[in-house]
Amino acid sequence: MFGVTIKMTATPKRLEKAVDKGAYKSLKHGALSIRKAAQESMVFAKGPSKPGTPPHAHTGRLRWSILAAEDEDKKGWTVGPSYSRVKVGGRPPWLAEMLEHGKTVIAHEKQSRRGRPRKGTSIKRWAVIYPARPFMQRALQRNLARFHRDWQGAI
């Protein structure tokens, strides 16, 4: 009869460091590829795009505003339009969300003077329906297969 003795040394710090490094690299690559896909989906053209297709990049401001940033806890990335880059010209902060998901906005005619309207007059109001023109969701869907391949060789 014989006996076998096995000695194993666990190095959890090294393993954890390797996992973090691989995850960071894969997440960064994924976030930047989503950003690039979203920017490339917007084409320069006159007029509005068809509902259900990415919005046209008339001036390129929305396209330029798409950022990818690392989260504060350094365990994730956030990708999407930044309002601070779009706000030029009085654009509303919900513009990108409206394009992505669609929205109904109550519009009204401009008053001819400051303050409340005169007695006996009414302000005309109507609903404006903006159909969805998704661009971020499409970019994510286009890159999902690549993410699976990247994660397989992350460590």
Image (tube, grey):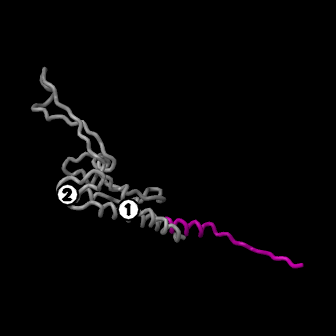
Q: Say whether marks 2 and 1 touch (CB < 8 Å).
A: no
Q: Is residue 33 above or below residue 88?
A: below
Could you tell me the amino acid type at mark 1? Ile
- Callout 2 crowding tier (Cα within 10 Å): few <14, some 14–19, many ≥20: some
Q: What residue is pinned by disc 1?
A: 34
Residue at image point 17% right, 30% down: 124
Q: State the image coordinates of residue 114 (x, y, percent, origin top left).
A: 13, 31
- Residue toward you, 130 or 31: 130
Identity of the residue furthest to the bottom in this view: 2
Query: Would you identify the image quadrant in which residue 129 lies?
Result: top left
Q: Is residue 18 magenta-colored?
A: yes
- Callout 1 crowding tier (Cα within 10 Å): few <14, some 14–19, many ≥20: many
Q: What range of the chain is rendered magenta?
A: 1-23
Q: State the image coordinates of residue 45 (x, y, percent, origin top left).
A: 19, 59
Query: Would you identify the image quadrant in which residue 55 lies?
Result: bottom left
Residue at image point 18% right, 34% down: 108
Distance, label 2 to label 1, CA atoms, is 21 Å
Q: State the image coordinates of residue 79 (x, y, percent, origin top left).
A: 38, 57
Q: Is residue 104 magenta-colored?
A: no
Residue 58 image label = 2
Query: In screen coordinates, is 145 left or right of 104?
Result: right
Q: Is residue 110 above or below residue 46?
A: above
Could you tell me the amino acid type at mark 2? His
Indicate the secondary structure of the residue bearing disc 2: loop
Q: State the image coordinates of residue 138 (x, y, percent, origin top left).
A: 36, 57
Indicate the secondary structure of the residue bearing disc 1: helix
Q: Is residue 74 above or below residue 104?
A: below
